[in-house]
């Protein structure tokens, strides 16, 4: 009996000791430190792991933590004091989450019904009915009727193409009788189509019209970038991060896998094509600048029409199989000459930059990485059951000591290669004419300094449009646009390792390594010696010059009213030159003792069409 009691008390004592090991008491004194520093201290001293979303927790808040033989719960409460978060502890894992705010009371719902008609009492089919400030919505049926459940007393919005939108209150109403009025201004708006112009009320094809007066072109280097999201079915994707980078257009999605999906683009009746991008002549890629509308001053554009259905193929043939984008520039108007000057300046910053490790974090995570490799080699921890241990492996020795971690320097590589972008442009135009002669001329200058250092673009354009009424039946006109674009390129390509561009290199480079070594040369990354120094890539000299002349003339004869015969003649001359030099201060420039490259392209094309 005595033996049984001894065994019982020994088991009870071991159980108490076991429970005490989980109820670890912590001693810590932290004064005026950030939440991040406090968490890192607990992690290093006591082995706890913290998990949280960066947006849920303010890690830069200054706190003071004082604890003497306190459980981990009390420590965490001091660290998270004043923050709208909760936490749970699962063994050595501490999970922090933002508190839920779902205390909104449920509003009463009511079901309304109604009928929508036009001025003549005819039902409108497919009108949109949507609850204001809500997500509930429906459309009217073949009889113009609808039914919708909304918050009691809320307003509903009714809209339909070609009619004025309405907002109607549902307060104390169960049935709505709504009469919609035509939007005369929208229906009388003139739209350019392949074979002339039409009023919107007479359109039967799938055409979207973009008025440039409603588009903020002043903050874009090219009009291509401003078109994104402006027309249903038109997808615009910027294919390069370069200033004035190339864009691709898709109308109603990609229909072909290998034959191309580019729509036909017509400027003032003349089909144009994109220029190519000359190669850099070295291992670093700067990205594409083959922007088909890069030579056009956005301030000169009157409207852009997007033809999306089969009618575009009937007019322009197989080239229009993926749709047509028609660009119409401003023409002269009858009246006294009007001179206008406009200028704007804008700054640009990266909205979401990379969140990089500082020197201390980098060393700490490096030690964890090598410790994990050591555990794998020894067959310990999570590797115990399925790895064959190496009994000859030496004891683990951290790559960085505590003193090195505490005194670790930090090089903000992203700050070394980026800046605040600046763009300014100036535009002068003159417009006027008589009942016989009308003219419009403009000049534009744009300078854009990108957010990556040394990445610049400069554009000069000049344009003239002239229309002459020769007789009652004959009309003629011409359009000329000349442009010169200068690009200062930096290697922003998507290569990896030794072919890395400047962004990739900055993300991967060791933050504890200085920009230059003691001898004044650019430092190499000891962990990845093949990776180029990001700052050294800024010394690559890479310049591109693009010149383009777009000219077109037309002769229009109207022998009888309603019948017009028109002939167009045009020229599109494209020239570009690219000069690059890879200096010996770069890693691979030194390997080849410096490298220079010169490439150029000259392309002329004429085109005429009668209709």
Image: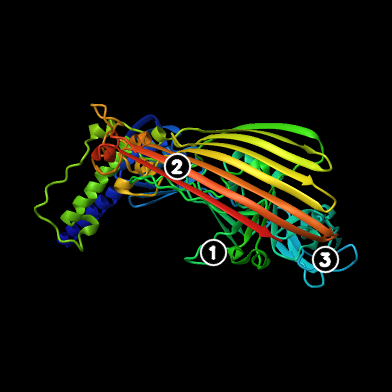
Quadrant, the C terminus: bottom right
Q: Is residue 151 left or right of residue 371?
A: right
Query: In screen coordinates, is 465 left or right of 392?
Result: right
Report the Cα–Cα distance between label 1 and label 3.
41 Å
Where 240 sits versus 526, above or below? below
User: Of the residues tagged 2 and 3, which is closer to the observer?
Assistant: 2
Toward the bottom, the furthest residue is 142
98, 218: nearer the viewer: 218
Q: What label does residue 114 carry, if any?
A: 3
Furthest toward the top, the residue is 519
Q: Which residue is mark 1?
A: 254
Residue 344 in view in this figure? yes
Instruction: Kindly identify which numbered label has been placed on residue 214.
Output: none
- Element carrying mark 1: loop
Residue hosting label 2: 577
Q: Nearer the viewer, mark 1 or mark 3?
A: 1
Distance in Å between CA atoms under marks 2 and 3: 66 Å
């Amino acid at each position: 009996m005595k033996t049984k009691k001894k065994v019982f008390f020994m088991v009870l004592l071991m159980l108490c000791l076991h429970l005490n090991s989980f109820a670890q008491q912590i001693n810590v004194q932290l004064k005026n430190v950030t939440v991040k520093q406090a968490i890192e201290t607990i992690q290093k001293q006591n082995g706890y792991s913290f998990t949280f979303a960066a947006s849920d927790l303010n890690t830069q808040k200054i706190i003071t933590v004082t604890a003497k033989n306190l459980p981990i719960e009390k420590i965490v409460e001091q660290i998270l004091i004043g923050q709208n978060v909760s936490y749970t502890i699962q063994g050595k894992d501490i999970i922090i989450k933002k508190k839920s705010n779902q205390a909104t009371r449920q509003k009463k719902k009511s079901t309304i019904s109604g009928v929508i008609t036009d001025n003549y009492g005819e039902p409108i089919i497919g009108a949109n009915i949507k609850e204001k400030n809500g997500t509930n919505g429906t459309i009217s049926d073949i009889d113009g009727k609808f039914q919708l459940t909304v918050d009691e007393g809320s307003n509903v919005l009714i809209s339909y193409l070609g009619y004025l939108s309405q907002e109607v209150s549902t307060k104390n109403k169960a049935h709505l009788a709504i009469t919609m009025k035509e939007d005369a201004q929208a229906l009388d708006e003139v739209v350019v189509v392949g074979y002339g112009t039409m009023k919107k009320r007479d359109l039967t094809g799938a055409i979207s019209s973009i008025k440039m007066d409603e588009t903020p072109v002043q903050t874009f280097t090219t009009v291509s970038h401003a078109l994104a999201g402006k027309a249903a079915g038109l997808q615009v994707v910027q294919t390069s991060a370069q200033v004035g980078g190339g864009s691709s257009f898709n109308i109603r999605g990609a229909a072909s896998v290998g034959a191309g999906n580019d729509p036909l683009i017509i400027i003032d009746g003349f089909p144009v094509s994109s220029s190519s991008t000359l190669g850099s002549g070295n291992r670093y890629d700067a990205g594409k600048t083959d922007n088909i509308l890069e030579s056009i001053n956005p301030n000169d554009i009157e409207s852009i029409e997007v033809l999306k259905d089969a009618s575009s193929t009937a007019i322009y043939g197989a080239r229009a199989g993926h749709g047509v984008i028609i660009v119409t520039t401003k023409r002269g108007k009858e009246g006294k000459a009007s001179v206008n000057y406009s200028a704007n300046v804008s700054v640009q910053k990266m909205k979401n930059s990379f969140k990089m490790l500082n020197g201390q974090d980098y060393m700490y995570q490096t030690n964890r990485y090598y410790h994990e490799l050591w555990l794998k080699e020894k067959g310990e921890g999570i590797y115990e059951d399925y790895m064959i241990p190496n009994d000859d492996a030496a004891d683990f020795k951290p790559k960085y000591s505590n003193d090195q971690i505490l005194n670790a320097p930090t090089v903000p590589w992203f700050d070394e290669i980026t800046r605040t972008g600046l763009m300014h442009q100036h535009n002068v135009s003159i417009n006027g004419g008589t009942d016989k002669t009308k003219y419009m001329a403009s000049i534009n200058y744009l300078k854009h300094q990108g957010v990556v250092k040394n990445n610049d673009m400069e554009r000069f354009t000049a344009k003239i449009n002239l229309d002459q009424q020769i007789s009652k039946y004959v009309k003629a006109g011409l359009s000329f646009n000349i442009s010169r674009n200068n690009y200062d390129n930096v290697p922003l390509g998507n290569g990896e390792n030794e072919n890395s561009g400047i962004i990739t290199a900055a993300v991967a480079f060791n933050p504890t390594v200085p920009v230059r070594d003691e001898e004044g040369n650019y430092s190499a990354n000891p962990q990845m010696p093949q990776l180029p120094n990001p700052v050294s890539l800024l010394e690559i000299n890479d310049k591109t010059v693009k010149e383009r002349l777009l000219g077109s003339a037309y002769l229009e004869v109207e022998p009888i009213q309603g019948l017009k015969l028109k002939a167009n003649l045009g020229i599109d001359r494209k020239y570009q030159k690219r000069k690059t030099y890879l200096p010996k201060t770069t890693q691979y420039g030194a390997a080849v003792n410096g490298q220079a490259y010169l490439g150029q392209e000259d392309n002329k094309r004429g085109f005429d069409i009668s209709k």
